[in-house]
Image (cartoon, helix red, strand yellow):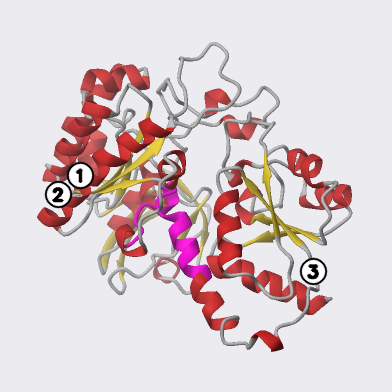
Amino acid sequence: MAHRITAVVKGSPAYRAGIRAGDELLSIGGETIIDFIDYQALTAPGRLTVKTRKGEYHIKKAEYADLGLEFSTGMMSGVRMCCNKCMFCFVDQLPCYARESLRVKDDDWRMSLMMGNYVTMTNVSDRELERIVRRHVSPLYISVHCMDPELRVKLMGTPRARRLPEQLRKLAEGGVHFHCQAVLCPNLNDGAQLERTISELTDLYPAAQSLALVPVGLTGHREGLSSLRKYRPEEARAVLEIAEKWRKTCLEKFGTRFVFPSDEFYLAANAELPDDEAYEDYAQIDDGVGMLRLYDTEYREAWEERIAPVPAEAQMETKIRPLIACGISAAPFFESLLQRRPIPGADIRVKAIVNHFFGPEVTVSGLITGKDLVEQTRDVDCTHVLISECTLRPEDSVFLDDMSLEQVQTALGRPVIPVGRKGGDIIETVFKLMEEQ
């Protein structure tokens, strides 16, 4: 397999050896290169034999130093796509008017390694699994969902899904670590099936590092799809009871709680969030596990540092009236946060945005669209609208419905301010807005 070299960093080991842009990489150390994973592993040693179309180069460099070659894509190959037909696939639930880029279904274990994306492993062949072990790829993030092979086939719509228990055992035997995820559906893979999943995964500890439990996400666009529903409060509490039982067992046995229900389960159950220490190192935070608790902790620390020391008589009168626009599930959290620790000089209100784009069943802040934001905050008396930065595409500040931040601000006639994800960011943002008045 040949890879065209698009650039060679001047002064790099490859450049000093005489390799130039336009040549094609054929092998390193006698091994062909499939992708960037191979390239990284094979260029780590201090002495290399690099073969290209134009010749063979013997290179000496510092161990792990960058060789200096650049290619047309960072992965050095195309992204591997999903072969599943999952009952709960979010992409299948997109409205017909959603942008096409949202419909891309990737399922690439290399992106799992590099970016923490969850993958199902259904498109990983035995040969590829051996390569993962040989390259000692860790940690991976794997969508397990359940450990019953036949139920996993039913949930994921492909016979390839039944191979996962065997794949996980091979990864564990090869010393590869992985974090797991289970998207739970009422009366399908919870209850006794969840008990089995946790039991079999803990048998793989420490290769299996943790398990996140996430309730199924449903939009209002499920015509022709499997019949699924949201968790009722008592059902969510039953999941938390199973999780808590295993968390206690695992903490005593392994020194880690291992099982981590997402914030959505606590909200659905009307249950209090665990304390900060219960999330340990927040390894599953990108899966919505502990996000609210960490935000609360960071907000409290920032508040105690910047606001608490200031005497009440020295605190300023109201200067601005910001509105926090967030998803329905997060609104009570923000209201409680601000009631317990208000920010002097700012009369802050919270507005829960109903998601008409995806459907009212979608209650998270990250999926708020520009149109919904405009329609539901246009008549609210406020000086600024504060939104989470995760509602916008980072490269061009565009919402999921293709409205730009600028278009939303023009429609509302007031500033719309993206706020960072850390708890202290909202305090810093509000103070900065007050300073600008």
Quadrant containing the N terminus is top left
* Residue at the farthest front position: 313
| Picture residue at 49% right of the left edge, 63% below the top | 296
Dot 3 or dot 2, earlier in sequence: 2
Give the magenta-colored segment's residue range.
280-299
* 282 magenta-colored: yes
Name the kind of residue labelled 1 in the image.
Answer: Lys
Q: Which mark is residue 86?
A: none
- Please, what is the three-letter code of the amino acid marked with disc 3? Ile
* Cβ atoms at labels 1 and 2 below 8 Å apart: yes
Which residue is found at the position 68% from the left and 70% from the top? 429
Q: Residues within 10 Å of mark 1 (few under 14, many from 20)?
A: few
Q: Quadrant of the C terminus?
A: bottom right
Q: Earlier in the sequence, mark 3 or mark 1?
A: 1
Q: Nearer the viewer, residue 376 or 144?
A: 376
Circles 3 and 2 in contact, beta carbons < 8 Å: no
Q: Is 412 on the left-hand or right-hand side of 236? A: right
Q: Is residue 143 visible?
A: no
Any part of residue 327 in sight: yes
SS type, badge 2:
helix
Q: Which residue is rendered at x = 48% and y = 56% of the image?
A: 292
Residue 320 is tagged as 3
For disc 2, the marked residue is 249
Residue that carries the numbered disc 1 in the rendered image:
245
* Image height of 352 relative to 154, above or below: below
Q: Secondary structure at mark 1?
A: helix
